[in-house]
Amino acid sequence: MTGKKLRLLITGHTGFIGQAFLRHMQSENRLEWVGRSFSGGCDLTQAGALDDVGPCDVVLHLASRSGVPAAWQAPDSFYRTNVTATLTVAEYARRTGARIIALSSYMYGEQGNQPIDETTPTSCRNPYAWSKRLAEMVLEGYASDFGTSTTILRLFNLYGEGQPDDWLIPKIIRQALEGDEIQVETLTPKRDFLWIDDLCDALMRAIEQPLSGCNIFNLGFGESHSVREAVEAVCEVIGPRRIVDLGRSRPNEISDCICDSGKFRRTFGWHPHVDFREGISRLVAARSAVSSS
């Protein structure tokens, strides 16, 4: 990109992904930005919450409630937050002419055919996925009715430095470092894990390449790994631990999902760099350094 820097509004800039993207963006020094987040006192579910921002070229919409287990416990909060905050962003973009880059989630349910591309019908199986699908529909409506340029990234699974400790891989690593036993709810589900820096690279490319209309892309590494594989990868780095399978599957658990990111790769020239075992090794090293400091 050359010439004038793009001005970027980031919702959810204080979260795991937002903080990682800010580090990535500042190292690139290609954008000016302003942030708004729930934790920073901006209630994005309120109409006009972004009225004080002023015009921006692009909105990177990261603000949301996330996590399948929590969504089963408080579905109303997930629907209200994820859908209404997205409506606030869409209305801001309509008024200012900003483009939208929005992070969505896996919403294909249980699929027999792998890998999964964007032509696969959606099949939401939990309140979190439903809330994100409804948010997508808001963006699709604004793109259709008002011409808002919108890029939606359906992220399969994510991991990396800075992820909260109650997520799967950080929880496994913490247990392995603190004791001789690793407990997991179940060992069998398989997921496609994308390293946080590869996601940040994808976001930067989407921000810098305008597209017309509403475009939806799947985003993942292209391989799936089971919970057992994650535990074993951690133990390869740290040393043997006793593995305890609690045998507690979530409602409507998905057995496997592999992402076909071909559409995004072709459009933006992107590809992931950090494979699963390298990512695990990096996380163990980072956590060990924190524990020993």
Image (tube, rainbow, N blue to C red):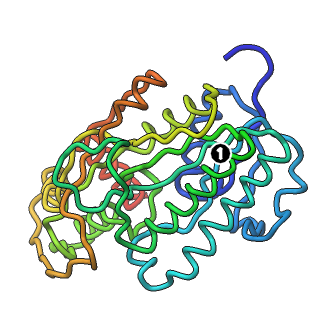
Say whether residue 202 is left or right of residue 261: right
Residue found farthest to the front? 145
Give the residue drawn at x 14%, y 55%.
229
In the image, residue 205 sits, relative to residue 281, either above or below, namely above
| Residue type at numbered disc 1 | Leu
**Residue 291 figure quarter:** bottom left
Give the residue drawn at x 39%, y 52%.
158
Residue 39, given in percent of the width and then of the height, sits at: 69, 68
Label 1 neighbourhood size at 10 Å, few (<14), some (14-19), many (20+)?
many
In the image, residue 132 sits, relative to residue 285, either above or below, namely below
Regarding mark 1 in the picture, which secondary structure is present there? strand
In the image, residue 178 sits, relative to residue 246, either above or below, namely above
Q: Return the residue nearer the eye: 228 or 49.
A: 49
Residue found farthest to the bottom? 73
Residue located beneath label 1 in the image? 60
Quadrant of the image containing the N terminus:
top right
Q: Return the residue nearer the eye: 95 or 103.
A: 95
Say whether residue 240 is left or right of residue 10: left
